[in-house]
Amino acid sequence: MHRHITVAGLACVILAGATPAYAASCAKREIVIDRLQAKFSEQLTAGGLQSTRSATAVVEVWASPETGTFTVMLTNAHGVSCIVASGTDWHADKPTPQPKGTAS
């Protein structure tokens, strides 16, 4: 649960601060994915839908345990993906199981 909240929070922060400079990092989703896999050995690790008043986008986090790189991208309804963040030193946390009926 915590991981999902973290990814959703990250996406909201990124969307709020996205600048037109990221527009240069957009292409058809298939092209972006091919580059992430070929150049960085990244694979899809998390994702979800992000809705605003005007549109809905798919938010995806691609990462590689081998290279330590990660990429956050948004894909619109037309299949165009834009990279909104990328970095190094990726690590994935495993959720701690919570007994039923307790707050997380």
Image (cartoon, rainbow, N blue to C red):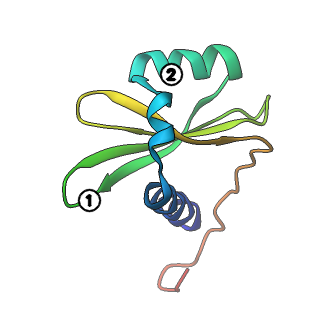
Residue displayed at 44% across by 34% down: 23
Q: Residue furthest bottom?
A: 102
The answer to the question of whether label 2 and label 1 lie on touching residues, with beta carbons closer than 8 A, is: no
Q: Judge the density around disc 2: few (<14), some (14-19), many (≥20) Cα neighbours within 10 Å.
A: some
* Residue 35 numbered tag: none
- 71 and 45: which is toward the camera: 71
- 44 and 28: which is toward the camera: 28
Task: Tell whether 37 sits left or right of 21.
Answer: right
Callout 1, which amino acid? Thr
Residue 51 percent location from the top left of the image = 28, 56
Callout 2, which amino acid? Ile
Tag 1's secondary structure? loop
Which quarter of the rendering shows the C terminus? Answer: bottom right
Q: Is residue 90 above or below residue 13?
A: above
Residue displayed at 70% across by 56% down: 93
- 42 and 93: which is toward the camera: 42
Residue carrying label 2: 33
Task: Tell whether 67 sits left or right of 53.
Answer: right
Q: Is residue 69 above or below residue 97?
A: above
Residue 101 percent location from the top left of the image = 47, 85
Q: Residue furthest left?
A: 54
Residue 66 percent location from the top left of the image = 79, 29
Please tell me in which quadrant of the rendered image residue 41 appears. top right
Residue carrying label 1: 52
> In the rendered picture of this protein, how many numbered marks are placed on residues?
2
Q: Is residue 68 above or below residue 54?
A: above
- 89 and 17: which is toward the camera: 17
